[in-house]
Image (cartoon, grey):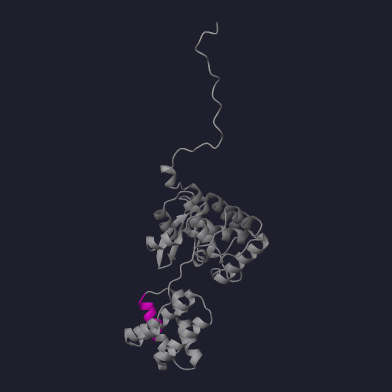
Amino acid sequence: MSPLRIQYIGLLTLRGYTQRTQESYINAVAALSRHYGHSPHLLSDGQVRAYLVGLHQRGLSRSTVNVAISALRVFYRDLLKRPVARIEECLPRPRKVTRRARVYSREELGSLFVTGCRSLRDRAFLMTVYGAGLRLNEACHLKFEDVESSRGMLRVNQGKGNKDRYTVLSPWLLEVLRDYWRQFRPQGSWLFPALRLQDKPMVDGSAQLIFCRALKRAGLPNRGGIHCLRHSFATHLLEDGVDVLTIKKLMGHANFATTAGYLHVSAEQAVRVRSPLDVIAPPPVSSSPPPPPPPSVSMTDPR
């Protein structure tokens, strides 16, 4: 390992970056170095900018490009002490794109859990992701001690942003988890360990594969990967009348703006909303013809 990489790892560690983020940042800087065949500290601003243009031209996602930008900014600005203005000029961030979350209906999720999952382990894992609104990495790193059955809560340790939180534990999910434990008896502390290495948690790739296979068996479309289960959790809570601040806490969002932008108005909610026009609308006018007048009565004496 080169001295420069050791210094970079030390900087990331001192700043409190998670192990997962450190790996992503190190890989991003290493990819730049491989691209030019030189140590990254020898590259000019123009070369770094040209590399970034190449990432965009390859059609990589905005999130992937942003990780590379963040990694290179920390490397050149904070480690190599290049002027901030130069770094921001050669490593601009792409414009933010607003996308609405795509979700599954409750009926589709029922099919996913029952028809799509052949293994009780797969069913328990996917139900945990949806039932507690977890991020993929959070679900993979759950431990048995995080299942607080007496309180009906699930503890998430060191989620995104190194924050702990609690979320809901469904009674149905608890029963499925108990059946899963009785059948598989996983060794160690991980709730969902890797199949071959029981002392290691399930890796993200294995979890995505479980989800994709279940979708195929259930005949459901892929609407953006396993993270759609988390979107569905939040959307269904919103449809059930749970307030947004509570959803924010369960989801582990740092600020309200994230939750407000993340939760779109569901079709069910839109149907229940009454337009203000209805309040001022005049009484409905009947389109049927008026009834015939009653027969006239003569007031004169017929005699």
Residue 99 is at least partly visible in this image: yes
Q: Residue placed farthest to the top in the image? A: 303
Up-down: is 242 above or below 46? above
How far from the left and from the top, in percent, is residue 271? 51, 49
Q: Which residue lies at the image location 53% right of the left edge and 64% below the top edge?
A: 227
Q: Quadrant of the C terminus?
A: top right
Q: Is residue 229 above or below residue 38?
A: above
For this view, does 10 lie left or right of residue 140? left
**Looking at the image, which is closer to me, 4 or 282?**
282
Query: Is 14 inside the magenta-drawn segment?
Result: yes
- Residue 94: give x, y in percent of width and height: 43, 77
Q: Position of residue 215 (x, y in %)?
A: 63, 63
The answer to which quarter of the image holds residue 72 is bottom left
Q: Residue at x 48, y 52 (%)?
A: 237
Task: Say above or below: 301 vs 52.
Answer: above
In the drawing, does residue 154 fall left or right of residue 78?
A: right
Q: Which residues are magenta?
A: 7-15
Asked whether the viewer can see residue 118, the reply is no
Whether residue 169 appears in magenta in the rendering, the answer is: no
